[in-house]
Image (cartoon, rainbow, N blue to C red):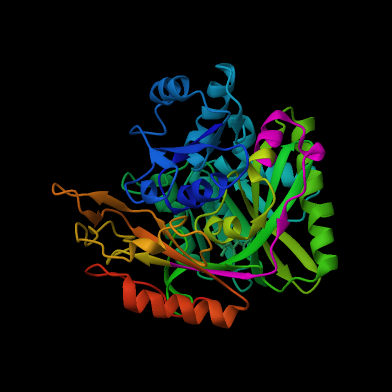
Amino acid sequence: MKVLILGSGGREHALAYRLVKDEGVSEVVVMPGNPGIELSPSVSTIGENENNKEEVLRIAKDLDPALIVIGPEKPLVMGMTDFLEENGFKVFGPSSKAAELEGSKIFSKKIMDKYKVPTAKSENYPSLKLALKGLDSWNFKKGIVIKSDALAGGKGVVVTHSREIAEKTLNDFMNSAECSVTTENVLIEEKLLGKELSIFAICDGASFKVIGRACDYKRIGDGDTGPNTGGMGCYNPINWPHGSILERIEKEVFSPILKGMVKEKRPYKGVLFAGLMIKDDEINVIEFNARFGDPETQVLMPLLEGNLFENLLAAAKGNLEDTAELKISNKQALHIVVASEGYPSIDNTPLNLGHPVSFAKSLVAGLQKKQNDLLFMAGVKKDVNGALVNSGGRVFGLTTIAKDLKQARNIAYSLLKKDLRFTGAYWRSDIGK
Ligand code: AMP
Ligand code: GLY
């Protein structure tokens, strides 16, 4: 059976690498993918734009896949799942109404408050005037967080203790033509303290299976300095929080949100990614995402044992509970992202692109049978001579699997120094430390 994956980054490469190993899957096609992804065996790429409904439908009709897996949030929020299901395909990914859990922070907050999912206290302001006046009622000593209601790719959140910065942020978000996350509605919430945790569950509308948790290094610089990025590295599993907190996360977060979404007539199917803040025994949801994390998927996929394809298909059909178990192996996976010079370019200055990317081909995920070092390709394209060059912010990422974190880290950093190169390549040197 064939699987079609929509998306083009390291996350989609990791999904393809993992799904093609499952019994029952003969071939995985990624749309549009990238020319690095298709180096993996039995994985090919097709098409141009995963957001173009007519193009996706044409390709899906040609391929006739048993399952379509949607990677990024944009096609989910714009209703790609609904559209493909109306055309008779099985799709792993939420409907546009369910994907609003990620697409609108205000909707997400309303649902959390209504169904008593623990989250930071917040207020929604529907105009700049009301938001500026609303600042009077917030305690800047404790800190506040301002969130744009637009789908923001990580750029729509500002955490601050300064009223001056808060006012400037509100003006940018609500009254600036240049700002990329302009919104008519803004959410202000209290700043939470603690440690962040990403946790992932596969959901079929009614039930769910937690498939792992990971920690994500969001800032560009070592020691968590500099601007936010899509994620510069991660590892899985992590040795906290302890069992009783994990049970509470299932009972107090996943369970009520899924029940709530059924009551709202927006049953949630697909992967639900909860970003949590944990402080001692206190659990709070920072945000929900309607998709797998990138790069978290690159450490989740290699450790999942069992038939993932059957589970995703069962989730798409609404019968996850009857499907064979998925287990997380007892090994340790660590992932380091290699980015182009200039990333994340918050001021939109151009990245240093177009340089030949050199890497040991044998590292590409899936090229060796019993492989512990896996290269997942993201921002690469072919130049006029057919050579791979860097073409985006995050260019590729290396996952290493070992018996413990120290070993995984040592192997990853020595491979990066030895085998993986392009002019201006940048990576953090403290992942897993
Ligand atoms: P979000 O897009 O909602 O995940 O926010 C991006 C990042 O902002 C999160 O990963 C946190 O580091 C930070 N953040 C968001 N909301 C809060 C909050 N209420 N308290 C503290 N940090 C937050
Ligand atoms: N790595 C964080 C995300 O995918 O949103």
* Residue 419 can be seen, yes or no: yes
Residue 407 appears left or right of 319: left
Report the front residue among 309 and 92: 309
Q: How many marks?
A: 0
Residue 148 appears left or right of 171: right
The stretch of residues the image draws in magenta is 311-336
* Residue 184 can be seen, yes or no: no
Report the front residue among 119 and 33: 33
Q: Residue furthest top?
A: 87
Say which quadrant the N terminus sits in: top right
Residue 377 appears left or right of 356: right
Residue 104: % across, % down: 57, 41
Report the front residue among 238 and 4: 4
Residue 14 counted in the magenta span: no
Residue 190: % across, % down: 65, 62
> Quarter of the image holding residue 331?
bottom right
Say which quadrant the C terminus sits in: bottom right
Report the front residue among 397 and 53: 397
Residue 217: % across, % down: 51, 69
Q: Residue at x 63, y 60 (%)?
A: 303
Residue 372 appears left or right of 317: left
Q: Residue furthest front?
A: 369
Please say if 412 is above or below 356.
Answer: below
Residue 381: % across, % down: 26, 49
Please say if 400 is above or below 102.
Answer: below
Residue 333 counted in the magenta span: yes
